[in-house]
Image (cartoon, grey):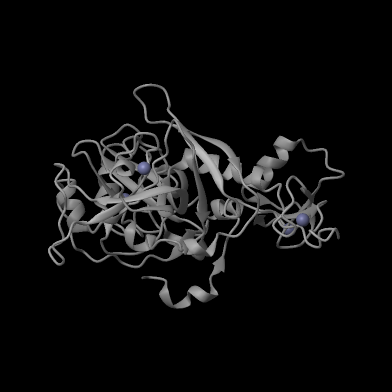
Amino acid sequence: MAFGKDRDVLKKVTSLREASNISRGRRPKGGGGGGWMRFKDQLKLSTVEADTVRFVPGEYPFTEVLEDGTTQDSLLPYLTFTEHFDGKCHTSGICSAGPYVGYKDKAEPCLGCDIFWESGGKKGGRMSSRDMKAFTVLNLGTFHEVDEVDARGNVKISDKTKKPFTQWVKCSGRRCDACAQGKPTKKGHLQHYAVGYGHFNQIKEYSKTVGQCCKTCRSKDTVREIAYLCPNCKDAVIDISTTHLTNEEIAKMVDGDVQCPHCRQKVLLEEIVECTGSMPNGSSCPEAVRAGIFDVDISFKKVAGPEGTNQSTLMFTGFGPVSEIDPVYDAKPMDFEKMYAPTPLEQQAEKFKAPLPSQTPRQPVPASQVSHAYGGTAGDAVGNQGGGGMFNR
Ligand SMILES: [Zn+2]
Ligand SMILES: [Zn+2]
Ligand SMILES: [Zn+2]
Ligand SMILES: [Zn+2]
């Protein structure tokens, strides 16, 4: 693990507004395999019935490339990775370019990126390049333990134990085969849920709705913003009681970095909130703290996009009271650094039927000389939502 030792000193981010502002850029570091694990225990939303889940925050290292070419590390509640899908070989892999993806001189080798740029670096080309975010979710539905089968429908047997491999699958409700067969049953199962840009933004938006609840007094609809400060000079950039800005203008300003009119720094504004709720004993709430996506159970399903596309949207059907996760579930964030580790180059060469890049070592490049690869800016050049991703199906 690239970060391992100084994790403790890294900035931990729990708010989705802040986290997404950081990860607008990109990429985790890492190495190794483990890609097969991605296909087990995935949350696959239904278009019929909503799943009720709790998002479980993790602490995943993320390296942000700043405007001056230097980097800054933080810990985000989700893991960010880039998925390449090769429309020619019908296979996918995880980008190995590292934080400097899109920077010709500083990026780590990635065949997916090479093919993406060779074929024009656009949506609809042979190779897609898609920013993904992986969450751990505790699915609060009913699950059954069933035998695992291979692609041909044969039960997979462990060489070691000579017993079938098993996996937990969600009860399909009425007419469920596993129910009929009396398979082992439990409530609640940890799953992973990887989303692209569109679904992530929907989750972020919904987090704002949840954010009207207070984490301290657990009241609903009692938290309001009163000001936005510059974290650098502490000046109030927006005072809600006097501002002439519309709600839309404010929403836009607080969503990403803005230039502080006082100190001229580019900053993500710090929100000051108040809570009108009260504690269970009747006293007024001592400290307003917005709840977020990780503090409530959320019910949502998928709405299919236009026929012939896989551009589905999410439909949130409700959320429960602010609460801790019941410890009986032992809900720990999954080891995404292993699960979503970059696909090793040799494997990429095999999958994409491409030659390995020449093994000339890359010279270290001073930050001031970092050139943007292939003409684009690192931030958005690769940021297309190219089709074909398998994670959202
Ligand atoms: Zn790549
Ligand atoms: Zn069942
Ligand atoms: Zn409160
Ligand atoms: Zn300032």
Residue placed most toward the observer, 383 or 34: 34
Residue placed most toward the observer, 249 or 320: 320
Ligand 3 shown in quarter: bottom right
Q: Quadrant of residue 340?
A: bottom left
Q: Quadrant of residue 310?
A: top left
Please tell me which residue is depicted at 21% across the width and 64% down the height of the picture: 360
Residue at the bottom extreme?
5
Please tell me which residue is depicted at 34% across the width and 43% down the height of the picture: 179
Is residue 312 rendered to the left or right of residue 308?
Answer: right
Q: Is residue 88 above or below residue 1?
A: above
Residue at the top extreme?
307
Please tell me which residue is depicted at 57% across the width and 49% down the height of the picture: 297
Q: How many marks?
A: 0
Position of residue 367 measured from the top left corner of the image (x, y, whole percent): 45, 63
Asked whether residue 76 is in view, the answer is yes
Q: Is residue 53 above or below residue 109?
A: above
> Which of the image's four quarters has the C terminus?
top left
Please tell me which residue is depicted at 51% across the width and 53% down the height of the picture: 55
Position of residue 348 measured from the top left corner of the image (x, y, whole percent): 21, 52
Q: Is residue 338 above or below residue 103?
A: below
Residue placed most toward the observer, 205 or 256: 205
Position of residue 228 measured from the top left corner of the image (x, y, whole percent): 75, 52
Q: Quadrant of residue 164?
A: bottom left
Residue placed most toward the observer, 350 or 45: 45
